[in-house]
Image (cartoon, rainbow, N blue to C red):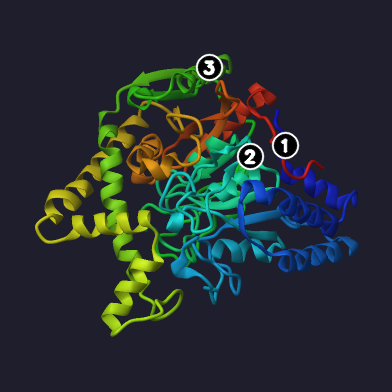
Amino acid sequence: MAEGKIKYYSKMLETKEISCSELTESFLTAIENANSDLNAYVKVTPETAMETAKAVDEKIARGEKLAPLEGIPMTLKDNISTKEIETTCCSKILGGYKPIYNATVWETLSASNAVLLGKTNMDEFAMGSSSETSCFGGASNPHNIDHVAGGSSGGVASAVGGNIAVYGLGSDTGGSIRQPASFCGIVGLKPTYGAVSRFGLIAYASSFDQIGPITTTVEDVAIVFDAISEYDKMDSTSQGRKGEPTVNSLKNDIKGMRIGIPREYLDGIKDEVRLAVENACEVYRSLGAEIVYFDLPALKYALPVYYILACAEASSNLGRYDGIRYGYRTESYKDVNEMICKTRSEGFGAEVKRRILLGTYVLSAGYYDAYYKKAQNLRGSIVNAFKNAFQNCDVILAPTVPMTAFEKGNAISDPIETYLTDICTVPVNIAGLPGVSVPCGFDGKGLPIGMQLIGNTFCESRILNAAWQFENAVGSEVFKSSKYGVKI
């Protein structure tokens, strides 16, 4: 069984085997040594980290008990607002922007003395599948730095997979937590829409975006999710976690659980990925679960529905970046109209402009009914298809990504082909469901393969328990630590 790092480090702190200052310094040193290869961090915050570590050490000295995440070094994706700490979404247009408030998730963790090591790399405004649309350059895969870490939360996955953060928070709009977790051989949870507050998350597509944890084990994911999944009055879509903490449900017997596999999820995936998923099915059978294959034809509409709706929402959400209120402003202009036009043309990267233009097009007069309205109707069909599926199975099992991490440069040279990497992940966002990616093997090059477990709304406990059971059954077979980072 893969040991959870959070409880491991917490025990070290409580028994005074190591001080929080020493632990934090070891991670800051590891970042300094590894980040030139991984490019996981775009901003390191040593002063903030050491100040928090000192407070934790003082608390330990007073004999006070630590909260589950207290003193644990972690990171945040660079689209999660941090008061007075630069938050750029890895875009030139937000260069120098320092929010005046914290995102709710960071407010919650900060109140528990979580140690923030820094902000991590991502695709610009979370638009991409490789982190290479970042104005800082892409994050590298800790298993092979010639390959991408995935996206858009690639920096978080690279940092956690590279042992230069214990855990991190990313955001998942169409697979942006699960896909990089799969590429980097770690665990990533996209919670039910509304389970975690989005207040302070810089929006890409508001009806799809969801914050979630990236860690090395299922237990760690459960601990972090439990900490951040509270109702928030600042987010009108917030509902919080339903039921008991998910960490309490781990280790429950899954004998008799019906695990469904839609045949459509297996179309067009690489042979090594298919074999790894089939082997995972055998593991579940050995644990007493029942594997049920079925058809889910609505899935064929998922990718076009996602890109039409997400780009439409992006064109609206990104309209606020005009050079007037904050962020980048072009140097020379004749009037306000030229200033806004030049600011947006110079400040946004190619992929962001591509998606804004697509979104504006599908919302324009004459095309709204043909594209946007039709996509919304199809979204309803996909939601209903999943509801029907969960009447016959408890959990859905699928590949996370049809392939393993591709080489750097592929996403830039062929962005349309890269969109296809989202084909297994976007249905979860369309339907607002929870999904967790778990390592399930390696390809011939030694690159990780991930599978995802999908649950009905607010069934995080069920999918995390099923994921924990798999992780416990296979042990270290599907986990291989990178050569980078802290090895305490």
Query: Disc 2 designates what residue?
Result: 142
Query: Disc 1 designates what residue?
Result: 483
Q: Tell me the quarter of the image containing the C terminus.
A: top right
| CA distance for labels 1 and 3 | 27 Å
Say which amino acid is labelled 2.
Pro
Q: Tell me the quarter of the image containing the N terminus.
A: top right
Residue at 61%, 45% (x, y): give it.
158
Residue at 40%, 67% (x, y): give it.
347
Q: Earlier in the sequence, mark 1 or mark 3?
A: 3
Residue at 41%, 45% (x, y): give it.
412
Mark nearest the camera among 1 and 3 is 1
Between 366 and 29, the one nearer to me in the picture: 29
| CA distance for labels 1 and 2 | 8 Å
Give residue 149's quadrant in the image: top right
448 sits to left or right of 201? right
Query: Disc 3 designates what residue?
Result: 279
Say which amino acid is labelled 3.
Asn
Give residue 482's quadrant in the image: top right
Secondary structure under the numbered disc 3 in the rendered image: helix
488 sits to left or right of 449? right
